[in-house]
Amino acid sequence: MLKYRGALVLMALLMLPSAAWSANNNPLLVGGPNDPPSRTDTPDNFATSPPGAHLTYYGGRVVSNMQVVEVLWGTGGAGTSNGHFLAQVVNTSTPSIATFYQQVLNSGYVDWLTEYNTDITDAGGNPGTNQTIGHGSFSEQVRITPVNTSSFLTDGDIKTELVNQIKAGHLPLPTADGAGNNNTYYAIFFPHGISIDSGGMISCRPGGFCAYHGTIVASTPVGEIYYGVHPDFQAGSGCDLGCGTGATTFDNVTSVASHEMAETITDCEVSLAPFNEPPLGWYDDNNGEIGDICNALQGSIVGADAHTYTVQKLFSNVANDCIVVPHVDGGGPILTISPTTKDFGAVKVHKLAKQTFILTNEDSSQTITFQRRLAIVTNSPIFQFPKKHATNCHQTLPPKGQCNLTLQFIARKKGTPESATVTIFDDAGNANQTISLSGSGK
Ligand SMILES: [Zn+2]
């Protein structure tokens, strides 16, 4: 059955999450007095993909070896005023948007996308486009002087300008793989003060979008065009709120850019596909594209330039999860806990004994993400998390990062030995980890 895909036809949107974890908002602890009921103001998709998520191949093209042309809209320099850009968007030295594309397109982030090669039969039983997904590169940064100088642009305005700039020779023509499939991705970055309307959704507004990617129908001599739209994320833009939980504005820009980049690689012709059939690429009817399924779940990739780039997790059909790179048994980031056992010994009845445990991400490149339930302790309330300062762990633990978890023991009876197990929930290669506790009253 053909299914009309309605408003999704036009664009693959990265939505503003309704509420984001603030950087200092700790995951919940379960099993002690500090065990509040489930919060409703936190994302449900925290650290995991929606149940049943799966990308289906509908027969369209993918991008074999992406070549990125970074397009700067207008002549502004680095700065926070209207018409200007985030410094790392304009600069091309490490770290910048230019080096982000070059490094991430040559990393493990792209290696496993071979699971979305198209040398297969599509959902309709027809042969795929027979493409192999591999590394790509940053091609060049080009500044255009738009004919359209409005500060309020529609997606149609952007398409018109892009095609005209290519026709005028200001932007290069798209390149192609050996079989004629486009490799070029025009990643357009907008300066501060420009608002974009994509099918009635407005950039950087609640209910709007942080970025999107799209397709322009082929015309002579330009051919088909794949492009991404990235509004300014600087303070006051609106996208400084709700477009990611990275430590810096640049981190959120690269996260969103990685989402659109990966969606372009696996579903580049989405805007031309009104139905679940070619040229739609890899798509989940319920959850959208490879990035949408894992929207706003962030991780990181360390480039060959030694910079740690924030990226968004992507959905892997093979792993059945949102990942940055696949976990190899024993090869994922390892979370160690010190100490792993604690005998509180003989403690006076009703007196309180405390122990702080140090959690360390031993990996030098991969981030560990904690689940919304950071930890559970059994045999509560004899063993419990203290009401205050139980942890300073955040949603993610960066490479080589450390955070603390504190447990307390309150003996109830003289001489009775007590024990408990703490389980910590995360996506580390050695998850889930446990701590053994024991003690007795005197
Ligand atoms: Zn998306």
Image (tube, grey):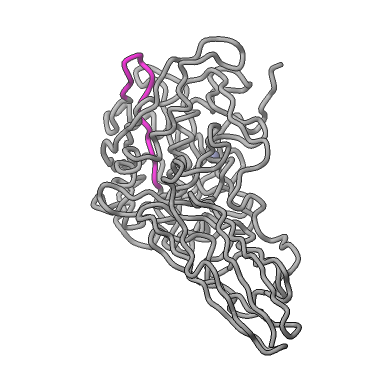
Q: Does residue 47 lie above or below 169 as drawn?
A: below
Magenta segment: 175-189
Q: Residue at x 38, y 25 (%)?
A: 64
Q: Which residue, as the protein is rendered here, is positioned at the far front?
A: 415
Magenta span: chief secondary structure? loop
Side (left or right) of 109 relative to 23: left
Question: Which percent across, then down, holds residue 194?
Answer: 46, 51
Vertical order, 190 against 166 (above or below): below
- The foreground one among 415 and 310 is 415
Residue 53 in which image quadrant: top right
Q: Does the magenta portion include 162?
A: no
Quarter where residue 135 is shown: top left
Residue 418 spot, x, y in % from top left? 69, 74
- Residue 417 appears in view: yes
Q: Position of residue 430 (x, y in %)?
A: 50, 51
Nearer the observer, 313 or 94: 313
Task: Using the rendered view, name the quadrant where residue 3 is placed.
Answer: top right
Q: Answer whether residue 186 is magenta in the image.
A: yes
Position of the N terminus, as image quadrant, is: top right
Report the image quarter containing ligand 1.
top right
Q: Residue at horizontal 48%, vertical 26%?
A: 116
* Residue 250: percent from left, percent from top: 39, 56
